[in-house]
């Protein structure tokens, strides 16, 4: 796992967006895995601005969102479909057929989950999976004790997650407690994973994910098994990392320095 630490949330989000743009430049018809939540809002704002500047093509990729609330139709203001339209899809003009989310109001949500998993496979899998992290270590809505081999399915949200999501709902609205979420096994099959964590509320989860045991108690720790996972965080989210000095030595200022031979030990020509 690569751990990149940035001074603040804004710089961390900017770097996350830069990496998505780089992916779209390298492969304009890439398959992206996308996340919702407060952490991602500045990422999508930066990505939409990059598309508007012409830095990359925002109309050729296909995206699969991680999750959707069971029971909410796509036009519900708190549905993740609505979130994605508002924060990204409408701004960049991504054709609707390429902007995929599970249908929260599907008559048979379990069948919808299976269909969604098959749809991802039919597109050849995910090139770049963007992830946030819950304060309890969830990725997508894979709550603690989720199988690390799980596939897209219905999950019951923990009380803590429901409470954390309450801020997006009105005072009289009920926060859904079930979601369709991509599984951890599905996430691990992505060709690259990029997790963004900002703010002190995520510090404990970030430490457990990076330095704790591989355990369903912290679903994000499954990324330790991902061959190409990068964690981008700000100082606050990095605050509980024990090996922080090491990460900052390997990736000073969040950069990826070129690998060079130590001074004086360069190969001499014979
Ligand atoms: C939502 C998702 C979740 C969030 C996580 C953090 O699509 O995948 O795992 O990334 O709950 O949410 P925020 O960013 O609101 O703290």
Image (cartoon, rainbow, N blue to C red):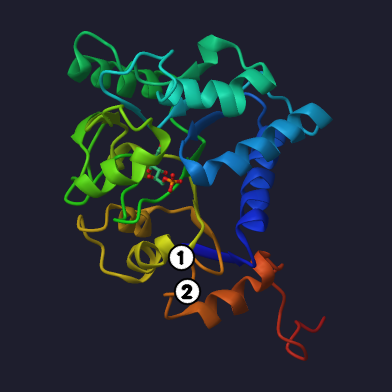
Is 184 left, or right, of 228 in this rendering? left
Q: Position of residue 192 (x, y in %)?
A: 50, 45
Q: Position of residue 138 (x, y in %)?
A: 31, 49
Identify which residue is drawn at 54% across, 11% down: 96
Determine the secondary structure under disc 2: loop
- The tag earlier along the polypeptide, 1 or 2, is 1
Is 239 left, or right, of 222 in this rendering? right
* 70 w.r.t. 37: above or below: above
Q: Position of residue 124 (x, y in %)?
A: 45, 25
List the residue tagged with mark 2.
239
Determine the secondary structure under disc 1: helix
**Cα gap from disc 1 to disc 2, whole angstroms:** 7 Å
In the image shown, does 165 or 41 lie closer to the viewer?
165
Proximity of marks 1 and 2: CB atoms separated by less than 8 Å: yes
Is 229 left, or right, of 183 in this rendering? right
* Residue 147 in which image quadrant: top left
CB at mark 1 closer than 8 A to ligand 1?
Answer: no
Identify which residue is drawn at 46% across, 62% down: 1
In the image shown, does 198 or 245 lie closer to the viewer?
198
Is 139 left, or right, of 176 in this rendering? right
In the image shown, does 159 or 50 lie closer to the viewer?
159
Label 1 vs label 2, nearer the camera: 1
List the residue tagged with mark 1.
200
Residue 54, can we see it?
A: no
Identify which residue is drawn at 51% across, 35% down: 127
In the image shown, does 237 or 174 lie closer to the viewer?
174
* Residue 24 in which image quadrant: top right
């Amino acid at each position: 796992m690569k751990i990149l630490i940035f001074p603040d949330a804004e710089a961390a989000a900017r770097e996350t967006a830069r990496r998505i743009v780089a992916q779209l430049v390298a492969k304009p018809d890439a398959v992206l895995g996308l996340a919702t939540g407060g952490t991602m809002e500045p990422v999508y704002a930066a990505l939409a601005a990059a598309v508007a500047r012409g830095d990359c093509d925002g109309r050729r990729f296909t995206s699969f969102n991680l999750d959707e609330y069971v029971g909410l139709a796509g036009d519900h203001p708190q549905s993740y479909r609505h979130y994605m339209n508002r924060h990204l899809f409408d701004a960049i003009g991504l054709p609707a057929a390429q902007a995929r989310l599970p249908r929260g109001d599907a008559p048979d949500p379990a069948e919808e989950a299976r269909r969604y998993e098959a749809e991802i496979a039919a597109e050849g899998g995910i090139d770049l999976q963007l992830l946030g992290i819950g304060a309890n270590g969830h990725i997508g809505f894979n709550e603690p004790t989720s199988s690390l081999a799980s596939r897209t399915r219905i999950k019951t949200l923990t009380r803590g997650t429901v409470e954390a999501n309450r801020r997006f709902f009105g005072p009289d609205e009920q926060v859904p407690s079930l979601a369709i979420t991509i599984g951890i096994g599905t996430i691990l099959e992505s060709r690259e994973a990029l997790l963004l964590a900002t703010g002190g509320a995520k510090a404990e989860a970030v430490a457990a994910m990076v330095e704790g045991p591989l355990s369903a108690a912290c679903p994000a720790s499954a990324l330790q098994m991902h061959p190409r996972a990068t964690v981008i965080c700000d100082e606050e989210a990095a605050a509980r990392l024990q090996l922080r000095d090491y990460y900052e030595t390997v990736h000073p200022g969040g950069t990826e320095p070129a690998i060079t031979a130590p001074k004086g030990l360069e190969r001499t020509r014979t």
